[in-house]
Image (spheres, rainbow, N blue to C red):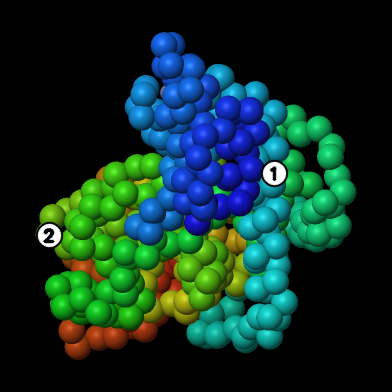
């Protein structure tokens, strides 16, 4: 069935020229190309859905336009205020799903695994945390109350959201665009090839998904043949996510999908972390999951730096890049962060491997907890760290 919000805005956008109207297909005269000049009755712009799609497609069989609702509403032929209203309504709707979910889940386990590591808060950096948290709490109340009442003009662009638009889940800001993970992604432990690939890397197939073929999703064809899929979950039990990463089991190939609305959200495990504790940020998901650190203390910044917005949501980010002595980029990034006073894991010089997953593969006699201990023994946030990197000792 076409999403009811999508159907509503599709009709707003096309005006009175509606054709067929079925639960999974609505047609209208195309406002993008103007449709047929000879036949004024032609209505070749459709919004439709198919079981294999998550989300609806807007498609004109005259001019060939084919995209999701977001991009349809961004077209110059569409009244721009519709796009703003649409984004707002979608957010509120998604927020309500999550809010109901949170009520049911109020008793989620708050216990914190301590692994013998004492965190000493840095005096200079924690200053804004408290006021930031208060602000977010009050905005949560606003959005709860305002679901149907407010009609304030919305002048923000998508990258710069004001706090009254923010939706929170487990105390964390929810990305503007969340969606249900496509059905064709199956659990990795149900597929032999995928399970073998993961077990060879000492990773647990039960924690991953698998895509056996290309996939058409949200108006895009995605090259996900034989790919392990790692969803970026908001809520796994509801299959609600804000993106995912595919990783080929045949060749060295990654495909990261995070909708363009979710700027600053190329980050893994965000809704599982305990934001009251320092979080260890890795370069890749496999490295984070091989670190032996507790699940609620790890994240990964995918192909980019951790965004300022995300970093501000947590007490502290501790950066665990690839082995600095094997990777120049990692060396550069680590030095930069150390100069800013951030805490960084510096690899001991006697380790040959370039990341935690290869260390784990090469040391079958050890466990990932041994690697966690190496990390905890080698954290630096001062001059000593810089010297250690520069002198290799
Ligand atoms: Zn058209």
Residue 78: % across, % down: 59, 24
The residue wearing badge 2 is 250
Q: Nearer the viewer, residue 182 or 349?
A: 182
Q: Nearer the viewer, residue 127 or 190?
A: 190
- The numbered disc on residue 179 is none
Quadrant containing the C terminus is bottom left
The residue wearing badge 1 is 88
Q: Residues within 10 Å of mark 1 (few under 14, many from 20)?
A: some
Q: Quadrant of ligand 1?
A: top left
Q: Against 264, is 109 above or below? A: below
- The residue sitting at 52% across, 53% down in the picture is 23
Residue 265: % across, % down: 51, 50
Residue 281: % across, % down: 46, 61
SS of the residue under disc 2: loop
Which dot, 1 or 2, sits closer to the camera? 1
Residue found at the far left of this picture: 250
Residue 227: % across, % down: 23, 60
- The residue sitting at 43% across, 50% down in the picture is 49
- The residue sitting at 29% across, 44% down in the picture is 221
Q: Is residue 286 visible?
A: no
* Quadrant of the image occupied by residue 245: bottom left
* Quadrant of the image occupied by residue 137: bottom right
Q: Against 242, is 63 above or below? A: above
- The residue sitting at 56% across, 33% down in the picture is 18
Q: Against 74, is 263 above or below? A: below
Q: Is residue 155 visible?
A: yes
C-alpha separation, residue under disc 1 versus residue under disc 2: 41 Å
Q: Residues within 10 Å of mark 2 (few under 14, many from 20)?
A: few
Residue found at the far top of this picture: 37
Q: Against 181, is 306 above or below? A: above
Which numbered disc flags the more N-terminal residue, 1 or 2?
1
């Amino acid at each position: 069935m076409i999403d009811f919000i999508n159907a509503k805005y599709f009709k707003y956008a096309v005006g009175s020229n509606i054709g067929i109207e079925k639960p999974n297909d609505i047609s209208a005269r195309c406002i993008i190309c103007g449709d047929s000049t000879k036949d004024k009755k032609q209505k070749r712009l459709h919004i439709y859905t198919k079981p294999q799609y998550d989300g609806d497609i807007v498609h004109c069989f005259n001019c060939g336009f084919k995209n999701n609702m977001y991009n349809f509403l961004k077209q110059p032929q569409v009244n721009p205020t519709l796009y703003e209203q649409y984004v707002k309504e979608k957010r509120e709707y998604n927020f309500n799903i999550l809010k109901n979910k949170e009520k049911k889940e109020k008793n989620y386990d708050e216990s914190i695994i301590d692994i013998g590591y004492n965190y000493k808060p840095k005096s200079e950096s924690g200053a804004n945390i408290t006021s930031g948290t208060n602000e977010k709490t009050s905005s949560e109340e606003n959005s709860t109350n305002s679901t149907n009442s407010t009609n304030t003009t919305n002048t923000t662009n998508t990258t710069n959201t004001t706090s009254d638009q923010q939706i929170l889940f487990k105390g964390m800001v929810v990305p503007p665009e969340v969606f249900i993970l496509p059905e064709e992604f199956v659990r990795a432990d149900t597929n032999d090839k995928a399970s073998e690939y993961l077990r060879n890397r000492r990773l647990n197939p039960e924690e991953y998904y698998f895509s056996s073929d290309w996939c058409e999703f949200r108006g895009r064809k995605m090259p996900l043949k034989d790919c392990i899929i790692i969803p970026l979950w908001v809520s796994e039990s509801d299959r609600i996510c804000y993106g995912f990463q595919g990783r080929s089991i045949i060749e060295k190939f990654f495909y990261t999908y995070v909708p363009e609305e979710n700027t600053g959200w190329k980050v893994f495990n965000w809704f599982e972390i305990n934001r009251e504790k320092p979080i260890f940020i890795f370069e890749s998901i496999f490295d984070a999951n091989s670190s032996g650190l507790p699940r609620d203390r790890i994240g990964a910044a995918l192909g980019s730096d951790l965004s300022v917005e995300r970093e501000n949501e947590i007490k502290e980010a501790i950066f665990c890049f690839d082995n600095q002595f094997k990777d120049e980029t990692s060396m550069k990034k680590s030095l930069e962060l150390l100069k800013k006073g951030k805490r960084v894991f510096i690899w001991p010089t006697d380790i040959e491997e370039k990341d935690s997953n290869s260390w784990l593969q090469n040391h079958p006699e050890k466990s990932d907890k041994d690697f966690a201990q190496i990390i905890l023994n080698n954290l630096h946030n001062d001059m000593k760290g810089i010297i250690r990197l520069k002198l290799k000792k």
